[in-house]
Image: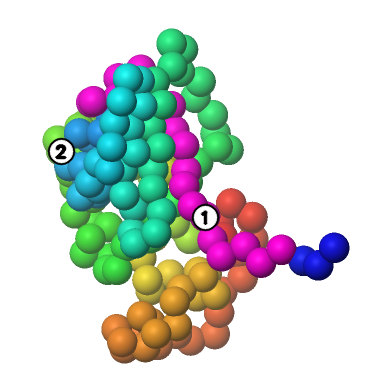
Amino acid sequence: MTGVHVYGINHVAIETDNVSETVAFYEDVFGLKMLKGGEGAAWCQVGEHQFLAIFEVEVLARGQQKHFGFIVKTEAEINAVKEKLREKYGLHVLDSGFTRCDFEDPWGNHIQVVDLHDESLIWLLPYREVQSLGIEFGTPKSASRPEDL
């Protein structure tokens, strides 16, 4: 069997106890648009080719390691997200070394937000977009923990 070429992540699924409130939160904080929704589920577009699947469950299970990350263009966008999370939603935002914004949404889903200037993610970025933005990097940082990648 030949190797499989994985192009990227198609979607991430999260759990909630209220789909409509969760969709409203992600629309408000990140500007996501709902693609479709149904009884106990919704799907929101993330970027050009990915989506966030939201499923309603009876019991929410919080977890430290299960998480996903969004990448935004600028640190100003990260700061706008932080401000909205703190001021509008009263959420605690943890600032750490590699991730610029680290928080739990109101349903216990752990989210990290980084920007295009995060050198630890250079190998993930579309080269043409990096060039078009004029971003230059120095010596790449090495992550000390897998969760920092």
**Residue 142 in the image, given as x and y percentages of width and height:** 61, 70
**Residue 5 in the image, given as x and y percentages of width and height:** 66, 67
Q: Residue furthest right?
A: 1
Residue drawn 46% across and 12% down? 59
Q: Which residue is mark 1?
A: 9
Residue 73 against residue 79 in the figure, above or below? below
Residue type at numbered disc 1: Ile
**Residue 11 in the image, given as x and y percentages of width and height:** 47, 47
Q: Secondary structure at mark 1?
A: loop
Which span is picked out in magenta? 4-21
Q: Secondary structure at mark 2?
A: helix
Depth check, front residue: 141 or 47: 47
Residue drawn 35% across and 20% down? 40
Q: Which residue is mark 2?
A: 87
| Quarter containing the C terminus | bottom right
Residue 131 against residue 48 in the figure, above or below? below
